[in-house]
Image (cartoon, coloured by chain):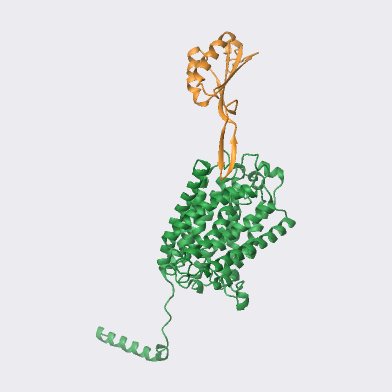
Chain colours: A orange, B green
Amino acid sequence: MKLITAIIKPFKLDEVREQLSSLGVQGMTVTEVKGYGRQKGHTEIYRGAEYAVSFLPKLKLEVAVKAEMTDAVIEAITSKAKTGQIGDGKIFVTPLDQVVRIRTGETDSNAL
Amino acid sequence: MRLTNFKKMGLGVAAGLGALMLSSGAAFAAAPPPDPLNSGDTAWMLTSSALVLMMTIPGLALFYGGMVRKKNVLATLAQSFGATCIITVLWMVIGYSIAFTTNASPGLNQFIGSTNQLLLGNMGLKSINPLAGTIPESVYMFFQMTFAIITPALIAGALADRMKFSAFMWFMSLWLIFVYCPIAHWVWGGGWLGTMGALDYAGGTVVHLNAGTAALVTCLMLGKRRGLGTENMAPHNLVLSVIGASLLWVGWFGFNAGSAVTAGYNAGMAAAATQIATAAASLGWMLVEWYIAKKPSVLGMISGAVAGLVAITPASGFVDAQGALIIGFAAGAVCYFSAVWVKKWIGYDDALDAWGVHGVGGALGAMLTGVFAKNVINSTGKGWLFDGNGHQMLIQFYDVAATFVYCAIGTFIILKVIDIVIGLRVSPEVEVEGLDINLHGETVHD
């Protein structure tokens, strides 16, 4: 199993979610985060006092999937989250040791 | 015997004539003097007082509150609210008396009033202060109280984010008594500046230059906020500041037009001048900022408006609409530079630009009053441009200089004393974590 973590631009959430649903991915966790890569932030000026806001709002999606679905999920996220502008985000794939569904106690593939 | 109506009438007339003759001595004495009270003036002054109070709570409170970081917003509001309360009581106890009564010694009266109205002991229902002959003294006292409240409260702009509440309340109290009241007496209460002919209709020097100077001294003595230049100190909610500035604008009609102390021609012209100057100043700041910084900020718009309100304050009862327009534009442009450029250049941390806007704006307004005052608008003043009275500029300068020097020295001494006894500034830990939770035990939750 793999945990796929994607940092995307916030306005892309709905498109990505729909695409993942159509793939059979049944759940995800979304967190509001701030970050930067190569995309610069903005500068705010208050009566001459400048503040460089380097951290931009992003969304972090986490989906747990069976290993064989990894490529399809990456393709789904990439195709929908991409705008072509700097700041589109990144995807991280990490191995997942165990998964448990709390309500039923099902484990691993049965819990995905 | 039963009296017929005719006989009853006759008895009534006889009784009346008899009473008249018995009191013939009194009947020939002077009739009681007519009541000097003018209900129109009184109604307006009551309204003005409430408007000016609103300028502090919640006008100034929100204006400043929105500009500080969220962790300090409650503490900033507490400063305006706390100042309102303590100054109200001290004004009643001693402030009004030493500012607006006449000292028995003419020499001393140049500098300070009397103790005749300690605890307002001699303010009866029908008392009248000669300075405002058509309204009850209770109303005049209340009106002036609201000025006494907002002036020290303005200083909070310079000490934002780093002063202890206890030290602040002591500062408000001592500053009222030793700085505000004397200066108010000098200009308005019968003292030397008013006698000399200084023109300050509603407090360009007494209120704004005074508070602004104190603000400058305070921020220099307190030192800069920790993290200035590196940490994000952006205003946490400019919506509050816009609401606050708008309340200041509306309330200011009580401030300027109310300083006519009557409801008539001068109040009307002062109101018109106030509105025109304020709008012009906001535009002035907006245009300068648009050109220099490429974007007109909301903070700039409201700051420009406040600068205009400050600058027209001393002039409002002496100038006409055209003078107001010019004063407004000048204030907007000049205060942009003093708040943005001079501050950056010299490097003092006047957090909310109390000196940059109120100090500079007040001084500018006081000098421009000398330029644009028109005798046909207000017979007590003659200006330079329209009445050929260049000497007025010198008098205005004395007013500005005396206020600045006395206030600077007085503020320095008061703050030094407070610092020695209880300390002015919060500890670094408190400053970093925030004043709300540490000084007041409260936070604003999302």
In the image, residue B431 above or below residue B200: above
Residue A70: percent from left, percent from top:
57, 11
Residue A18: percent from left, percent from top:
47, 18
Quadrant placement of the N terminus of chain A: top right
Say which of A58 and B19 sits in front.
A58
Residue B200: percent from left, percent from top:
52, 65
Say which of B70 and B232 sits in front.
B232
So how many labels did they put on this image?
0
* Residue B385 seen in this snapshot: yes
Residue at far right of view: B420
Quarter of image, res A73 = top right
Say which of B343 and B72 sits in front.
B343
Quarter of image, res B213 = bottom right
Q: Is residue B303 left or right of residue B416?
A: left
Quadrant placement of the C terminus of chain A: top right
Residue B315: percent from left, percent from top:
49, 63
Quarter of image, res A105 = top right
Say which of B177 and B334 sits in front.
B334
* Residue B127 seen in this snapshot: no
In the image, residue B319 above or below residue A71: below
In the image, residue B23 above or below residue A22: below
